[in-house]
Amino acid sequence: MATLGTSRTKPLDATTVEAFAATLRGPLIQVGDPGYDTARTVWNARIDRHPALIVRCAGAADVIAGVTFAREHGLLLSIKGGGHNIAGTAVCDDGLLLDLSSMTGIRIDPQRPTARAEPGVLWGELDAEAQAFGLASIGVDVSSVGIAGLTLGGGFGWRVRHYGLACDTLLSVDIVTADGRLLTASATEHPDLFWGLRGGGGNFGVVTSFEYQLYPAGELLAGLLLYPVTMAHEVLTFYREFTTTAPDALTVWAILLTAADGAPMLALLVCYDGFGPGAQQAVQPLRDVGPPLADHLGSMSYREVQTLFDAAFPAGRQSAWKSSYLGEFSDEAIATMVTQFAAVPSPQSAVLVEHLGGAVSRVGTNETAFAGRDAPYSFLIVSVWPDATQSAQNIQWTDECWQAMQPWASGGVYVNYLGDEDPARVKAAYGRNYDRLIAVKNKYDPTNLFRVNQNIPPA
């Protein structure tokens, strides 16, 4: 049998692997097996890694077996939920991949109202179930994103200003820790671990079940307003002033993009959590700017809003992201953003400014591991191109655009937007919460078994 990877000092023999496979309910997939390439593939086509073993977990028992096997045999361990992470941390070279995509159980309790969901569930699937009861989560901008990675890193979405981040709506989790124990973490059980899981990513174990608070989901006023790029300075200046006093129910994101005909455009993505005279009144000032070339605001269901970005984020394309929180969105920052976008090499790329604040900012910075509570905006470069031959110029533009915006950055960054970057950037994502996260890591993963992620190494 061929050596199973370079992440350990000795190769695993066939007998050891066969004995491991016999302990699993789900299949164990090896290099060359049917389904291997599908199981190792993630959303970002730039990621091309080859694990030695893939466990397609059927339940928590398979997760426990996989974690134990990786620990006992010195294997690199990666965890795949939805596989949408830009850095591709769901998959490793030569080690063991725990694929959770088959764990898709969902249970809605309309009386509490809460949802219990397994880590392979996608946000669109969760909300399809919840909306049958007139309920929904905080709302994510791409329905194919997995619940696990988004929640553990914090969780941006359309209704975070109204109800808080995805991690703020988390009530409890079941988690397999590095020693192979299955624990429940909540505000009353292992509260230190629960604190770290709300923003600290996959550093502390493998979550096998998430319990969320749900909220009413009725008709929404949502859609987009389109402006020619020649109006970008005017509209973005108004956007800056408008968002400082917008009600919590209203979220507005600004995005520079290229239209299908090749024209550069500015779009305002709008979501008001509700519909009626109050919603119309709240968004009317946005309609009065310009006026826009196109007004696509109207009544939408919650699930329709959740798919607004789906077409822009298909799997299988080359992509690089770069992001920072903005401490201010000054006239100079606006001018720089517009100037940098004018040099974009790919018509599939975009630059976003995401409107935060509201309920996000009313949770204390030290109440969860997520540390970007006081940021008014998140700035994100989404660089996308069709094939690897164009990578150098697109990555260079991404880096230069990001660097040009740093004079107005706060120094922090949303951890779910980090690519393969310097460890200092991970530390910047957590700010003054970082030392406390190290303490949680020391307790629950002192050997850093869970390190294929935006890693917080133990002391």
Image (spheres, rainbow, N blue to C red):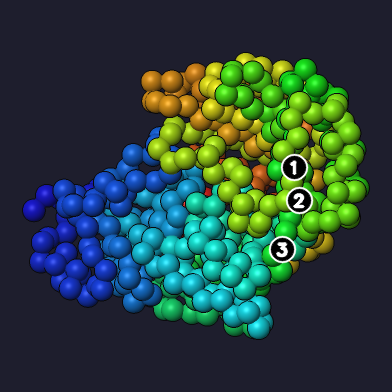
Name the quadrant containing residue 192: bottom right
Q: Secondary structure at mark 1?
A: loop
Picture coordinates of residue 76 (x, y %)? 33, 55
Residue 418 as seen in the image, left or right of residue 376: left
Judging depth in this view, the residue of 132 and 208 nearest the camera is 132
Q: Above or below — where is 410 with respect to 331?
A: below
Residue drawn at x 23%, y 52% as measured from the top left: 35
Residue 392 against residue 224 in the figure, above or below: above
Secondary structure, mark 3, is: loop
Dot 3 or dot 1: first in sequence order is 3
Amino acid carrying label 1: it is Leu
User: Which numbered marker is on residue 221?
Assistant: 2
The residue singled out by tag 1 in the image is 297
Quick check: 153 left or right of 159? left
Q: Amino acid at mark 3?
A: Gly
Q: Is residue 433 visible?
A: no
Q: Position of residue 382 (x, y in %)?
A: 58, 34
Query: Which residue lies at the image location 80% right of the left edge and 40% below the top edge?
Result: 327
Q: Position of residue 207 (x, y in %)?
A: 48, 69
Label 2 secondary element? strand
Asked if marks 1 and 2 touch (Cβ < 8 Å), the reply is yes
Gap in angstroms between the C-alphas marked 3 and 1: 16 Å
Give left or right: position of 346 versus 242.
Answer: left
Along the line of sight, the residue nearer the viewer: 73 or 318: 318
Instruction: Give residue 218's mark.
Output: 3
Give 439 or 176, whichever is nearer the viewer: 176
At a point 39% along the width and 25% down the height, the residue shown is 388
In the rendered image, the vertical position of residue 446 relative to residue 409, given as above or below: below
The three-letter amino acid code for the residue at tag 2 is: Leu
Q: Residues within 10 Å of mark 2 (few under 14, many from 20)?
A: many
